[in-house]
């Protein structure tokens, strides 16, 4: 079970991600590493976007499932421009 919460904090948005019910401590730790990497990449995208972002521009997180260990996750805007 994954819960996302968004909170307004001094003209910024705080994202709280909670994932529950892991099969083991090891599984929890692996998920923590994965989510940390994902959120770090999201932060980098907003700090250094590939182009000026429009206020209503959609964003999507893409992952290449085929051989996912060979392809980095990519964030892209609705225009298809991405940031590795």
Image (spheres, helix red, strand yellow):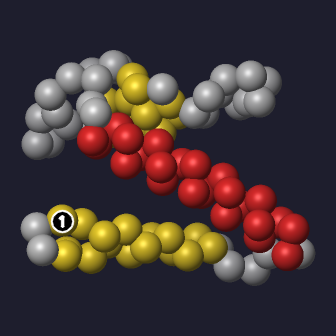
**Which quadrant of the view contains residue 21?**
bottom right
Q: Secondary structure at mark 1?
A: strand
Quadrant for the N terminus in the image = bottom right
Residue at 77 percent across and 70 percent down: it is 28
Give the mark count: 1
Q: Is residue 18 above or below residue 53?
A: below
Residue 55 horizontal/vertical position (percent): 11, 42
Q: Give coordinates of residue 62: x percent, y percent.
A: 52, 33
> Residue 81, percent across and down?
33, 19
Residue 2 visible in the shown view? yes
Q: Is residue 10 above or below residue 83?
A: below
Observer-nearest of 25 and 19: 25
Q: Is residue 44 left or right of residue 73?
A: left
Which residue bears the numbered disc 1? 12
Q: Residue at x 71, y 61 (%)?
A: 31
Which image quadrant for residue 76?
Answer: top left
- Which residue: 58% across, 49% down? 37
- Classify residue 73 as left or right of residue 47: right
In the figure, is residue 48 to the left or right of 31? left
Query: Residue at the spot x=68%, y=79% of the render?
Result: 20
User: Looking at the image, which residue sits at the far bottom?
Assistant: 21
Q: How packed is label 1: few (under 14 Cα within 10 Å), some, or many (20 or more)?
A: few
Q: In the rendering, at what x and y percent does residue 75 appear?
A: 43, 34
């Amino acid at each position: 079970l994954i819960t996302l919460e968004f909170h307004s904090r001094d003209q910024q948005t705080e994202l709280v991600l909670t994932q529950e019910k892991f099969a083991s401590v090891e599984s929890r730790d692996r998920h923590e590493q994965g989510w940390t990497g994902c959120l770090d990449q999201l932060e980098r995208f907003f700090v250094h976007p590939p182009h000026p972002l429009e206020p209503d521009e959609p964003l999507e997180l893409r992952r290449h499932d085929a051989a996912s260990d060979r392809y980095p996750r990519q964030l892209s805007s609705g225009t298809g421009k991405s940031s590795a």
